[in-house]
Image (cartoon, helix red, strand yellow):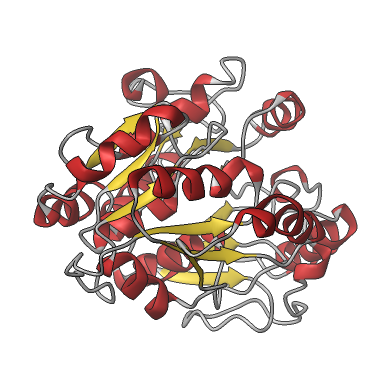
Amino acid sequence: MRIGLVAGPWISVPPATYGGTERVVDSLARGFAAAGHDVLLAAPSDSTCPVPRVPGMRPSAPEDLNFTLSELSHVARAYAGMDGVDIIHDHTMAGPLYLLRPERTPVVTTIHGPLNSQAQDIYRAIARKAAVIAISRDQASHAPGVPITRVIHHGMDLSSVPMGSGRGGYLCFVGRASRDKGLLESVMIAREAGIPLRIAVKMREPDEIRYFRDAIEPVLGSNEEFVGEVDDASKYRLMGEAFAFLNPIQWPEPFGLVMIEALATGTPVIGTAVGSAAEIIDHGRTGYLGRTDELAGFVEMAAGLDRAVCRRAVEERFSEERMVNEYLRLFEKLLAGEAPSGVPDAVGLHQNL
């Protein structure tokens, strides 16, 4: 197949540091190419993903994150370069609605954000002309009126992720400086458990900086070590030497990529039982899930979990190969006319749910 991939305009593919969606797009591009398919990637011009790319794209612009004009301009350039592909896999929200996309070329789009009421309006419209992919059953359950063609969990490449020893004597938190991500809760959980906490956070947007300044800085003390934003190698070392990873998210996150990253290093996850967490964490085997006020009580128990079991869970359920193969099977069905765009088929959502 000749597969067109469209990433967003704001972060390079792969991201230098933080960027979950872009990390997934990079894995898909590499995986499709490794499987013998021709891949054409529309991404910011400073991307380094080693597949052919649409020329004439602008550099990444994180300062314009979520600006409509930025995304529309990017999409117009991306689709102008997509002539000749067999199928387009779009990771933007605007792209599947673009009027001037190549005629008779199927489009698949993956929903990376929450399906709130506004997003539901958009994806109901998209589903009339494209196949819509949810990234967790929980995400799909929040929008029963949106036709979902498949639920496909994210996967990751484990080849560059070392197993850690878990002997660092600390807990860790990695994520955005955001109330939703549970950073403040992580500080309190670690203190209640009497265990040092190392904190690696993305803090670039005004809201993130304001939240960290107002809610986190005033409570930081000797139990916390602030690491800042880290690259992949540093992140995996940090996770791997922690004996548990804290993920007390305060919102129904569609898919917590950071959870499978922690598990890949062998580190169990302690988190709130919301969003996709129960689809990723096997309570009592690869971590513990509960209410925020219960999580400190799981810390000592998590230290006794088998790290090899955590790693194996990613190898078996959340590998890049599994994710790539699920998308490729869907593309083949769409091109064969077996799974019409926007219509759940017999092996689609209803079976997954």
Q: Is residue 53 above or below residue 258?
A: below
On screen, residue 219 versus residue 345, left or right, reads: right
Q: Residue at x 86, y 52 (%)?
A: 68
> Relative to the observer, which residue lies in front, 187 or 165?
187
Viewer can see residue 238: yes
* Image quarter of residue 69: bottom right
Viewer can see residue 107: no
The x, y position of residue 3, in whole percent, is 49, 62
On screen, residue 198 versus residue 209, left or right, reads: left
Q: Is residue 321 above or below residue 53?
A: above
Q: Is residue 223 above or below residue 330?
A: below
The x, y position of residue 144, in whole percent, is 56, 15
Q: Residue at x 57, y 33 (%)?
A: 251
> Relative to the observer, which residue lies in front, 257 or 26?
257
Location of the C terminus by quadrant is top left
On screen, residue 175 versus residue 329, left or right, reads: right
Location of the N terminus by quadrant is bottom left
Q: Is residue 72 above or below residue 191?
A: below
